[in-house]
Image (cartoon, rainbow, N blue to C red):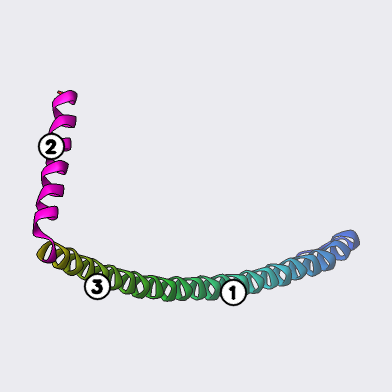
Amino acid sequence: MAEMRSPSERFNANPMQEMGTAVKEKARDLAESASGMMSDVKDKAQEWASDAAEFTVQAKDRVQEYATSAAHKAAELGENFTDVIRRHPIPALLVAFGVGFLIAQATRRMS
């Protein structure tokens, strides 16, 4: 048996269906938009991670260059210092004695 509807119920059924369809379409559009936004966010995060990795490699290389340069300069300074001591042993000994004496005096006063 078919259900009997009044004319006002039949009139309201069609707009309700249209509204339901419109809501479904809007929800689908929002879901697609959100999916696109998430894809953009993912792409941007990957780009930033790549940039950070590249920056890290460049920083590591630069630090290694500075460390190597500093090690060479320290070795050169040590060679120059040793050369000066060999050329002038007595003044070097007197300077070492004077520095040792000053350090002893300073630590004695602190105690």
Which residue is label 3 attached to?
Answer: 72
Total numbered labels: 3
Is 22 situated left or right of 97 in this image? right
Q: CA distance from mark 3 to mark 1?
A: 48 Å
Q: Nearer the viewer, residue 29 or 62?
A: 62
Decide if residue 89 is in sight here. yes
| Mark nearer the N terminus (3 vs 2) | 3
Residue 61: percent from left, percent from top: 35, 75
Residue closest to the eye, 3 or 46: 46
Q: Nearer the viewer, residue 3 or 16?
A: 16
In the image, which is nearer the foreground, mark 1 or mark 2? 2
Reply above or below: 97 against 76: above
Magenta segment boundaries in residue numbering:
87-110
Q: Secondary structure at mark 3?
A: helix
Dot 1 alpha-carbon crowd within 10 angstroms: few under 14, some 14 to 19, many 20 or more: few
State the separation of the CA atoms marked 3 and 2.
Answer: 32 Å
Determine if the magenta segment contains residue 103: yes
Q: Secondary structure at mark 2?
A: helix
Question: Label 2 near label 3: C-beta < 8 Å?
Answer: no
* Disc nearest the viewer among 3 and 2: 2
Residue 1 visible in the snapshot:
no
